[in-house]
């Protein structure tokens, strides 16, 4: 049986190893901006203007654009993404593939990844300084199959909550999130999941890229992004109040009923089996 209680982690040192780097000047940094993200402070145009003033080429994401193909086609020495958590990982994955530095510009709703790398989530303009800083760090990424995740993959009622939230997002009313939570909570039966072959009667399973401090519906900060470990958090019971913690480099999660999951907050169907693993130090990231 795998039962490890959640441990609190706090470190004084910053995540990853900071390296001073000099990029070749023959290429231009490239930034993809999702104009449908953000809260209009700054506006997408203001963000793009500030980036261009730093010599960064800017592309506004349009309907039908493929983030990965845009990043692969960029003739750049660094690639950035201005958007929410769900749009960061595809671009970061191409940076891993091309061995290029990645720049995160917090321009979404929650911006958990930006918080965990030490950025001010309310100041996307300040994050642009990373393009010129020369301060590079290497951090871990998670993989589910071959798909990269920067934060976590969730199963159970949290994944249901994300799916419900997406279904009601078009309404744009103040009660969309509350309604999603209420509809999700009506599902009293736990998900029929197995973790590494062990059956779980779990309300929530969260597999994280490095360790979180977390409450049932609240993701706290990660103290490190270079531990080289995945953390699986399992919450059972009708109103779960505690978590069982499992630590490893790989996890396999299965369900004969199919796995409805959320990858970095984006709903996805993963079939009956998901193989997750950590990819230590795979991502080069520039920080201000």
Image (cartoon, helix red, strand yellow):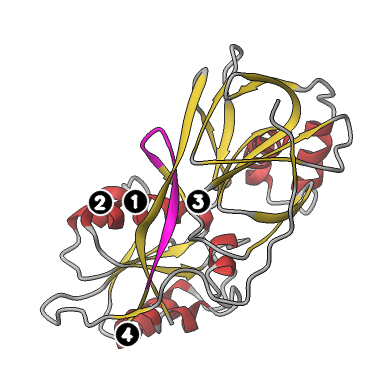
Q: Which is more toward the observer, 125 or 223?
A: 223
**Mark 4: secondary structure:** helix
Report the residue marked by disc 4.
132
At which x and y percent is residue 157? 73, 33
Tell me, yes or no, if residue 61 can be seen here: no
3D distance between C-alphas at marks 4 and 3: 25 Å
Mark 3 vs 1, N-terminal side: 3
Pointers 3 and 1 in contact (C-beta within 8 Å): no
Numbered disc 1: secondary structure: helix
Q: Are marks 4 and 3 in contact (CB under 8 Å)?
A: no
Considering depth in this image, is 229 or 91 the residue closer to the camera?
229
The image quadrant of residue 122 is bottom right
Q: Which residues are magenta?
A: 137-147
Q: Earlier in the sequence, mark 2 or mark 3?
A: 3
Identify the residue under disc 1. 93
Q: Distance between the Cα atoms at labels 4 and 2?
A: 22 Å
**Pair 4/2: label in front:** 2
Q: Residue, x 60% and y 17% (percent of image)?
A: 255
Q: Given this view, does label 2 or label 3 mark the residue nearer the observer?
A: 2
- Does residue 162 sit above or below 51 in this rendering? above
Check disc 2 and report its element: helix, strand or loop: helix
Name the chief secondary structure element in magenta.
strand
Q: Which mark is residue 258?
A: none
Label 1 neighbour load within 10 Å: few <14, some 14-19, many 20+? many
Tell me, yes or no, whether the highlighted magenta stretch contains residue 204. Answer: no
Which residue lies under the disc numbered 2?
A: 97
Q: Residue at x 46, y 79 (%)?
A: 127
- Residue at 51 percent across and 57 percent down: it is 227
Q: Secondary structure at mark 3?
A: helix
| Rendered image quadrant of residue 59 | bottom left
User: Which residue was labeled with disc 3?
Assistant: 86
């Amino acid at each position: 049986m795998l039962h490890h209680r959640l441990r609190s982690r706090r470190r004084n040192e910053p995540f990853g190893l900071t390296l001073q780097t000099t990029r070749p000047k023959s290429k231009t940094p490239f930034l993809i901006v999702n104009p449908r993200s953000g809260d209009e402070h700054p506006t997408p145009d203001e963000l793009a203007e500030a980036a261009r003033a730093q010599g960064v080429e800017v592309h506004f994401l349009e309907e039908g654009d493929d983030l990965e193909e845009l990043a692969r086609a960029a003739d750049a020495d660094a690639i950035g993404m201005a958007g929410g958590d769900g749009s960061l990982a595809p671009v970061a994955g191409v940076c891993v593939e091309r061995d290029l530095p990645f720049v995160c510009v917090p321009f979404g709703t929650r911006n958990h990844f930006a918080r965990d790398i030490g950025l001010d989530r309310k100041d996307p303009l300040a994050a642009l300084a990373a393009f010129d800083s020369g301060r590079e760090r290497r951090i871990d990424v998670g993989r589910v199959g071959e798909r990269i995740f920067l934060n976590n993959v969730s199963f159970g009622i949290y994944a249901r909550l994300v799916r419900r939230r997406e279904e009601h997002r078009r309404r744009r009313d103040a009660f969309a999130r509350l309604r999603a939570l209420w509809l999700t909570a009506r599902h009293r039966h736990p998900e029929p999941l197995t973790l590494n072959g062990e059956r779980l009667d779990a309300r929530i399973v969260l597999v994280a890229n490095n360790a979180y401090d977390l409450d049932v519906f609240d993701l706290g900060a990660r103290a490190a992004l270079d531990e080289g470990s995945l953390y699986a958090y399992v919450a059972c019971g009708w109103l779960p109040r505690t978590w069982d913690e499992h630590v490893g480099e790989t996890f396999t999660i299965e369900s004969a009923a199919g796995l409805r999951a959320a990858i970095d907050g984006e709903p996805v169907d993963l079939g009956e089996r998901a193989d997750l693993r950590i990819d230590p130090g795979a991502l080069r990231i520039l920080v201000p």
